Amino acid sequence: MEHGSIHESHASTFSLADEDHTLANSVRFALNQDPRVSFCGYSIPHPSDAKVNIRVQTTGDPANEVFKDALQDLMVMCQHVRSTFEKAVVDHKTTSESFENMSIDSK
Amino acid sequence: MSSDTISELDAHLEEAKKRIMNMPEVPMGKLPPHLQRQRTRVFCNSDAPTNTEGIQYSGAYASMGVDNSVRLDQFIKNFKVEVIQIKHHVDGNVYDNFMEFDMIGIDAALANAFRRILISEVPTMAIEKVLIANNTSVVQDEVLSHRLGLIPISVDPRLFEYMSENDTPNEKNTIVFKLHVKCTHGRLTVRSDELMWLPNGSGFTVETDPYSDKKSKPKTYTSFSCSQDSLPEFSDNPISLTHSDIIIAKLGPKQEIELEAHAVKGIGKTHAKWSPVATAWYRMLPEVELLEEIEDQLAEELVEKCPVKVFDIEDIANGKKRATVARPRACTLCRECIRGEDWENRVALRRVKDHFIFTIESTGALPPDVLFTEAVKILEDKCERILSELS
């Protein structure tokens, strides 16, 4: 849910249910990397509520758009991490297999 | 002051700024080495670590003309994964199931998100309901149930659905195990291999109204529409427990346990029994630098100081010896080598902020490499969920 002003779209607070530091801190990182962001931060109002508030203030662009771009960037990063990781695992498995075969041959 | 003088002053300042920025000492687009080091390293001094925070803000060095934002294409170019080892085998009583890999060029925010998700949000199957028909052992029902819940089950949770409160247990959301043991004489140790998988679901019948239709099939605690071992994913790969030698209870003469355990899908956030990892952790890459040549007596002293043998001695000309950093990765940052007079001026200990040595120990439901890809997918799903909620 977005809490913002009708007149000023450059600053908003996004209230996310069922999320915690895992997402909020990652999104804050992604937001901080964006030069359009002048301020961002998050808070968990109460430890027993599964809820985080993420504050986004921009230099002029709509906060909503900037926030969505940050999420989009985060997704692209994750996809890249996954594909790189999968490739590294396959590479490792093939090289370690060929290494094992080599030691069998030398016996 | 008139506006003329102000604009003149401004122009003057602007001119001065230009002149400074054009000096050969000002590296454009690049941070001076000491700031670059503060940005990328944690300094481990003898009293306390410094520069521990990550500098994430894109405009942190804007006044120096340096852009600190991580562009996606830059991230994609620089990000690297190096697998160190994957162990996934059972050898008698030794059960190895872990992997170690290096993640290079990523912020701690993301590395930590993956770690948190691995521990508390990747689903597995675990025993949640225990139907006890008979328990005359000294282990109380609730203690016994708790112990059963913690036993890891070796089954791919992706083949199952979550069971919500109003769902009836069926072959897609429940795995049923049966335990029936009786001690005839002496002592009997009940181990996890006594738990038998019931692919047809519960064998216990629900007591119903005796006057109702007696011809209908007796109702059990589950309603499986087909046997689980007839499903292609389990037909040649029966569901079992990861370990066969976990002690569940000890029975004395004539004591008996008869029960059924129903396993469902869940996440570690609800209860640690659903956590797919024994632990998942990372550490930043240690960096050890010798700030001056350390020779002879001092070199030997340094090698002696380190409990994990980070340093070695090499022979240089004229029978002299010199200390070298041979195994920086083994460094635990115990700071023993910078303790004592002057040692802090000879050795510098640092950690590389964007290089993570990640270790995942799986409990056996999924191999550790699959767990990591699942964790990354979960973070993607979270982003996608929020995006769809906002638009």
Image: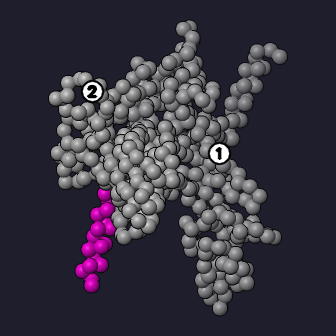
Q: In this view, does B367 lie above or below A59?
A: below
**Mark 1 or mark 2, which has the lower sequence index?**
1
The magenta region covers: A87-107
Judge from the rendering whether residue A95 lies leftward or rightward of residue B288; answer left or right.
left
- Of marks 1 and 2, the one in the foreground: 2
> Helix or strand or loop: what does disc 2 sit on?
loop
Q: Which residue is drawn at 51% across and 57% down?
A: B357
Q: Residue furthest bottom?
A: B319
The rendered magenta stretch, by its main secondary structure, is classed as: helix
Q: Mark 2 lies on which chain?
A: B
Q: Which residue is drawn at 31% across and 44% down?
A: B176
Q: Is residue B24 magenta?
A: no
Judge from the rendering whether residue B327 lies leftward or rightward of residue B34; answer left or right.
left
Compute the Cα span from label 1 to label 2.
70 Å
Residue B53 is labelled as 1
| Residue, disc 2 | B210
Where residue B158 sits, quadrant-wise, is top left
**Amino acid type indicated by mark 2:** Pro
Tell which of B113 and B96 is nearer to you: B96
> Helix or strand or loop: what does disc 1 sit on?
loop
- Residue B101 location (% of width, % of height): 44, 58
